[in-house]
Image: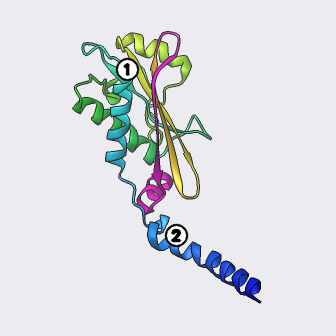
Amino acid sequence: MKRRTATLALLAAALALPGCARYYYGDAAHVRADLVESNAQAIDILLKNTALDPARPLLVATLVSVDRLGESSRLGRTLSEQLAGQLVQRGVLVVEPRLRDNLVMLPSQGELLLSRELHEVSQRHDAQAVLIGTYAVSQRAVYVSLKLVHPVGNLVVAAADYTLPMDDNVRALLYAR
């Protein structure tokens, strides 16, 4: 009888744990993404892990979907804009993509830099590196991967990854065109 009572008590406690976990840690659906802060932290990581020449510019490509490397979204374009702004705030020279004549701007995609264009574009602007990135969408989060790539040899000189919780704002940026 004691064994049966102990087993039932253990089972009841196990069933109650998921409710406790939500109570103490919060429901993931209520976590809000702070894009500006996430991008600022990612830029700090990138700059901490590489030495850039302050006299030479950087190019920032539009972040693209890891599933469709030729496509972006409003989220990808917004992240790219914020990353470029964070670099400028830290004293890095950034070439403004809308003023470049050698990249075709697709109205719904932004400035996409494919590897075959990387060397040519960076040479025209004497760019020391190009910031490229991808994002992967899951049900509860968007996973962002950034790389600073040296245009000669396509060597990755720094990388940073971060996660954005899937909230209503992130979802709207993802699916709006």
Task: For label 2, count other residues whose C-alpha is less than 10 Å away and answer few (under 14), some (14-19) or many (20+).
Answer: few
Left or right: 11 with respect to 52? right
Task: Identify whether 135 is placed above or below 105.
Answer: below
Q: Tell me the distance, in whole angstroms, between the alpha carbons under discs 1 and 2.
A: 40 Å
Residue located 37% across and 23% down the image = 59
Span shown in magenta: 151-177
Query: Mark 1 or mark 2: which comes first in sequence?
Result: 2
User: Local crowd at mark 1 within 10 Å, few (<14), some, or many (≥20)?
Assistant: few
Residue 96 within the segment the image draws in magenta = no
* Location of residue 115 with respect to 172 vertically, above or below: above
Label 1 SS: loop
Q: Is residue 14 left or right of residue 101?
A: right
Q: Nearer the viewer, residue 116 or 48?
A: 48
Q: Which residue is mark 2?
A: 21
Q: Give the residue at the far bottom of this rendering.
A: 1
Secondary structure beneath dot 2 equals helix
Q: Residue at x 58, y 39 (%)?
A: 66
Q: What amino acid does circle 1 point to?
A: Thr
The residue under label 2 is which amino acid type? Ala
Relative depth, front residue between 125 and 102: 125
Quadrant in which residue 124 is drawn: top left
Image position of 69 with respect to 34: above or below: above
Front label number (1 vs 2): 2
* Residue under label 1: 50
Figure quadrant of the N terminus:
bottom right
Splitting the image into 4 quarters, where does residue 140 fall? bottom right
